[in-house]
Amino acid sequence: MPVYEMLGGAYRKTIKLYANYWFLAGEGTPNDYAREARAMKSQGFTACKMDPFAHTSYWYGSDLSANLSLTAEQKDLALQRLVAVQEAVGSDFPIAVETHAMLNGPTAVEMAHRIKDAKINCMWYEEPAGPEFPEAIAEIRRQISLPVCVGERLHSRFMCLPILERHAADILMPDITRCGGISEMRKIANLSECFNIPIAPHNPNGPISTIASAHVMASIPNFFLQEFMLTDVPWRDTILDKPLPIQHGSFHLGGEPGLGFDLAEEEVERHPGILNSQPGFYV
């Protein structure tokens, strides 16, 4: 039987996705972001995530500690990117704002207020502080009006509990490749349900992660949206026995046993560099 049946049955078999990694082309100008946003929306997605602080120095191997306080120019450019994207996709199109926990507290609060003032339809404000600081996340959440989402670096339900107990997040985003797999993600979802918190699994990963996350999301009542890596390697679907069933911004689960897919092992062996040099990323 399918994994979602082993988990108790499906609340849904259509798993709504939001697009990420659609904004990497170009030089990072607001016009570049707007152009890529229109192309992303044309593929049927109804929500997306972006890092308006990308193309600044922390994405290019510089000293991370030097980038906790953005310059005035970087702050303005980040906001200009968000405004350009929102105008390109329309005001009813939600945008999750990524920070990668790279901003210090005052900067995270300041940018959240500026995003709100710019009338961005912010689906959530992601990782305003690192997972080591649940109290800091909770304090930032108290100071801002944007929904807060954390969880990609929480490796078990035991790490999620302090976030939930402190009411530090509006949405939780565990990553199935980091949090202990299918069973642990399901337990995290159950725990989050006790705190009335929805789940939006983190998934900037390969097809197996996408499939496994979709099965868990089918089986829980508190599913919100699932991340999908739009810009991927050109051979993504070739390592499976059939392409991912993604249409109009959703993953459509079938009734095949297990995860419903088999690996094309000979094709997998043709790409050892990515699979082995970034363990846990492309799965």
Image (cartoon, rainbow, N blue to C red):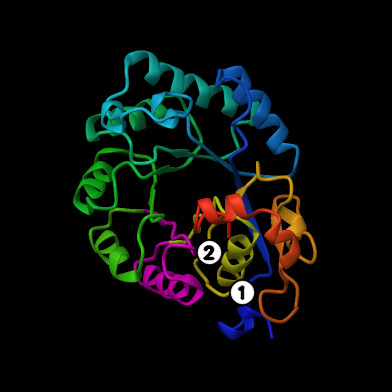
The quadrant the C terminus occupies is bottom right
Side of 271 where 96 appears, left or right = left
Q: Please tell me whether residue 112 is drawn above or below residue 1 in the rendered image.
A: above
Residue at x 44% of width, y 70% of height: 189
63 within the magenta span: no
The type of residue carrying mark 2 is Phe
Horizontal placement of 37 versus 235: left or right?
A: left
Q: Picture coordinates of residue 242 (x, y %)?
A: 80, 64
Note whether 189 is above or below 267 in the view shown.
below
Crowding around mark 1 (Cα neighbors within 10 Å: few <14, some 14 to 19, many 20+) is: some
Residue stretch in magenta: 170-197
Quarter of the image for residue 29 reads: top right
Residue 136 in the image, given as x and y percentages of width and height: 21, 46
* Disc 2 from disc 1: Cα separation: 9 Å
Magenta stretch encompasses residue 194: yes
The furthest residue to the right: 242
Q: Which residue is mark 2?
A: 223
Q: Position of residue 62 (x, y in %)?
A: 36, 27
Q: x, y (%) of residue 209? A: 58, 62
Mark 2 and 1 residues: CB-CB less than 8 Å, in contact?
yes
The answer to whether 39 is drawn above or below residue 154 in the figure is above
Pick the front one: 62 or 182: 62
Residue at the extreme top? 73
The residue lying at 30 percent from left, 38 percent from top is: 144
Q: Which mark is residue 149?
A: none
Q: Residue at x 23, y 53 (%)?
A: 134
Give the residue type at disc 1: Tyr
Figure quadrant of the N terminus:
bottom right
Q: Residues within 10 Å of mark 2 (few under 14, many from 20)?
A: many
Residue 227 appears in the picture as rendered: no
Which residue does the numbered mark 1 point to in the structure image? Answer: 11
Residue 128 placement, left or right of 268 = left
